[in-house]
Image (cartoon, grey):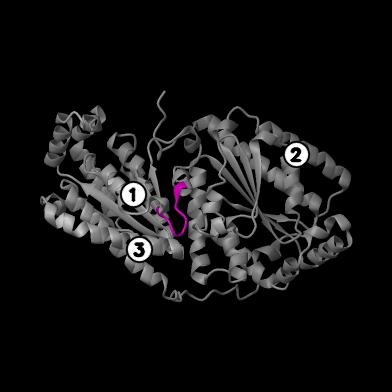
Amino acid sequence: MFESAELGHKVKKSVYEDEVPALREALLTAQMELAQSGAFQVIILIGGLDGAGRGATVNLLNEWMDPRHIQTHGMGEPTDEELDRPMMWRFWRALPPKGKIGVFLGSWYTWPILNRVNGKTDTADLEQSLGRAKRLEKMLVDEGGLILKFWLHLSKKQQKKRFTELEKNPLTRWKVTKRDWRRYKLYDTFREVHENVIRHTSTAEAPWLIVEGEDARYRNLTVGKILLKALQERLQLAQAPAPKALTPPWMPPIDNLHLLKTLDMSQVLEKKEYKAQLQKYQARLAELTRDSKFKYMSVIAVFEGNDAAGKGGSIRRITKALDARFYQVIPIAAPTEEERAQPYLWRFWRHLPRKGRVTIFDRSWYGRVLVERVEEFCAEADWMRAYSEINDFEAQLVRHNLLVVKFWLAITKDEQLRRFKDREKTAFKTFKITEEDWRNREKWELYEQAVCDMVDRTSTLLAPWTLVEANSKYCARLKVLKTLCDQIETKLKHLHESGVNYLDTPKKKT
């Protein structure tokens, strides 16, 4: 796999000095066109062996292009804040917006590789990490991003020569550390793991580009020319209309029976009984979130539902039982310009809670398969692929001891009409009813089908949906509280019995 990167590639100084000015000018032109168009984001991963010129390559890109439009990230050991979230959180936060270039020295491959080489994980763990990396890259490309992955390689002999030369020079001695020599002794192990990584993650949409790193001039020209060609080709493609995706037909059940029609919407509860049960479950929730093991987990509660179904009222009954210092409610509306410049899931990743916290989403990432689907704000291919992207997102959360509790609050069409009219008549409720609510009501059947498809495709063992019969606000609030308490209690019991384990991130030094 690395044969072509061990041939001793070299570029003469005269050739290099001849070609660099034109290359730099072309790169700057392409970069400015990208910045002005804001058409897509560029993500560059610089991986490879110690001594192969990774840092020098990052510096070169900043020197040859306008650094104002380049975001450079040296992803070293994760901080305590980053360790509190899934491994991918730190990379999602660092993604460049459309029109910018993000350069990563160290990436989502770094710690899985190091953990495998150092024996902290096995091959199965590594392959699971690589699977997550591939799914992330596929999603970024589907969202319009351009990913370039450079692997800078040295033979074992070249690496030893490089370290020795650097150590001999007093001005460069600092570049070689004891850690570098320790890793050199593990060269064969690293090579085996590197080959495994490249073989599994060099895909059509994001292939690895292996570059020999011994000769700096060869390395610089190669990386620069590849980047230029990729930018120019992609800028031309961005000006062409997107091809229409061909998807299979999407049909409702032929007997017109679906999940929402099976709900018992006739449930009622007396106010006196409601108040007693409400106090009971709020007290239970308060006690659970103060459990000694709660600091090792997080809770994400997702609220979706029909307009006027009572999401806000249910959320307020939850927050009343929580310590205000340790929860946050995130209302989701139409995306801002900042959010539109990023992949769809970016604005949800950024709000993930730390350990010991509760985050409540009033509407969520499911907007893509609900309102965006029904209102045709995105292409069919986009909301079709969103199901698997959402499942993968939630699986990463659960794997990191984030409990994901999802509620769909359902009311009948007649009950919604009654609540709409009540809002229009009540002065302090008029802000709750808008023209958009009435327009959404006209598409009731389309939303019903979208909800049923959403539940069928995203209600998993890791993060199941709870359908809440919400014609009775009292019954709905109690079911939400009871479900939330039950799931937190189950998670806490598991933590008390088994403890915590992270496979993708290194242990913090003590």
The residue that mark 3 highlights is 30
Q: Is residue 25 above or below residue 504?
A: below
- Which portion, as a residue range, is magenta? 94-101
What is the secondary structure assignment of the residue under circle 3?
A: helix
Point out the frontmost of discs 2 and 1. Answer: 1
Could you tell me residue 318's position as x and y percent?
72, 42
On the image, which quarter does residue 282 sit in? top right
The Cα atoms of the two marked residues, 1 and 3, are separated by 14 Å
Q: Are marks 2 and 1 in contact (CB under 8 Å)?
A: no
Q: Amino acid at mark 2?
A: Lys
Q: Amino acid at mark 3?
A: Ala
Please indicate, yes or no, whether residue 448 appears anywhere in the rendered image: yes
The residue that mark 2 highlights is 320
Q: Please report the residue visible at 76 percent of the width from the left and 54 percent of the height from the top.
A: 310
Q: Is residue 213 above or below residue 288?
A: below
Could you tell me residue 455's position as x and y percent?
59, 60
Q: Residues within 10 Å of mark 2 (few under 14, many from 20)?
A: few
Secondary structure, magenta segment, majority class: loop
Could you tell me residue 163's position as x and y percent?
17, 34
Point out the frontmost of discs 2 and 3. Answer: 3
Q: Please report the residue visible at 16 percent of the width from the left and 31 percent of the height from the top.
A: 169
Task: State left or right for residue 168 relative to residue 350.
Answer: left
In the rendered view of the protein, which quadrant contains the C terminus?
top left
Q: Which mark is residue 62?
A: 1
Q: Please report the residue visible at 19 percent of the width from the left and 38 percent of the height from the top.
A: 187
Please indicate, yes or no, whether residue 205 appears anywhere in the rendered image: no
On the image, which quarter does residue 284 sit in? top right
Could you tell me residue 314's position as x and y percent?
74, 48
